[in-house]
Image (cartoon, rainbow, N blue to C red):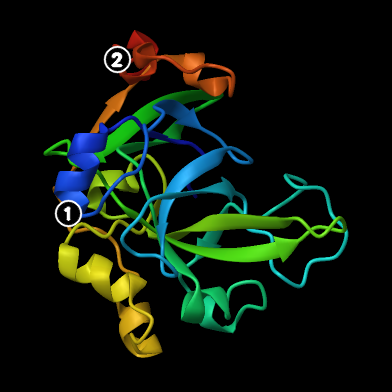
Amino acid sequence: MCGRYSFVASKEKTQKQLGIKVQGVLQPNYNVAPTNMAYVIASDSPTEVQRMVWGLIPYWSGEIAVGGGNLINARAEGISAKSSFRMPVRQHRCLVLADSFYEWRVYGKQKLPYRIMLKDSAIMPLAGIWDTWERPDRQLVHSFAIITTDANDDMAEIHDRMPVILTSPEEQQLWLGKDTELSTTLALLKKLPNNSLRIYPIDAAINSVAANSPDLHKEVAAPPSLF
C-alpha cells in the first residue's frame, strides 16, 4: 500500500531529470494525502506536468462525493481485468511525481513511520493510472491511483507492498506511450531492484495530514524499546 508521499523537488530538477517543461511554480508538499491535488505526467500530454486528485474515480461512477472511498492504490496483480482499472491501464497511464513515500512499521502495539527514497535522492516517478469523471454539475474531475506490487528486500521488513517505481527514461516512455502493447505495459509493473532505497525513521508528526513542513523529512532515532 502507498497512503502518503512527498514531492518537493525543484522545477529545475524536475525538468532536467524527466526531460519535460514545467510551466509555473511547483508547490512543495511534504505530506501528500488522499484527496489532495498532486502532480502527474499523464499519457494524454506526456511532455507537461498536470495536477489531478489522488483517489481514482472511474468514469462510470455514479453520484459520489469526491474523496468518498475513492481508490488511492491499484494492485498490479490482475489490474488489466478489474472493472475500475482495465480501461485506465490500457489508455490512461501516468507518472505520479514523488521524491519519497511513507510507510509505517508495526512493533507490537506501536507503529513507527519511515521515509523511503531512492539512494541517489532522485525523483521517483510512481506508476499510476488516471480517469476522468463527470460530476452531476458537468464539471470534469481528473483523478489517479498509484499502482503497487510486492515489496523488494529493502522494503520487506517495513511492509509487504510498495509502489511501482519507474526509474529509467525508457520505462517512463513506454509507460506513457499510447501505442505500447498491453503485455509490455504489464511487464513494467515489477518491484524495484534490491539495494535501491534509503529507508529511515521519521517523527510521528507525519501521522497528521495537516502536517506539512521540511521537519517531516528529518531522520529520528528509533525508540530504544524497539531494539
Mark yes or no: residue 188 visible.
no
In this rendering, position of residue 183 left or right of residue 108: left
Residue at the (41%, 25%) spot, across then down: 30
Q: Which residue is mark 2?
A: 218
Q: Position of residue 148 (x, y in %)?
A: 44, 59
How many numbered marks appear? 2
Mark yes or no: residue 206 visible.
yes
Q: Which residue is mark 1?
A: 194
Q: Is residue 217 above or below residue 39?
A: above
- Which sits in the foreground, 193 or 112? 193
* Quarter of the image where the C terminus is located: top left
- Which sits in the foreground, 31 or 187? 31
Q: Position of residue 205 (x, y in %)?
A: 49, 14
Crowd tier of the residue under label 1, counting other residues whose Cα lies within 10 Å: few below 14, some 14–19, many 20 or above: few
Residue at the (54%, 74%) spot, across then down: 88
Closest to the camera, between mark 1 and mark 2, is 2
- The quarter of the picture where residue 58 lies is bottom right
Of mark 1 and mark 2, the one earlier in the sequence is: 1
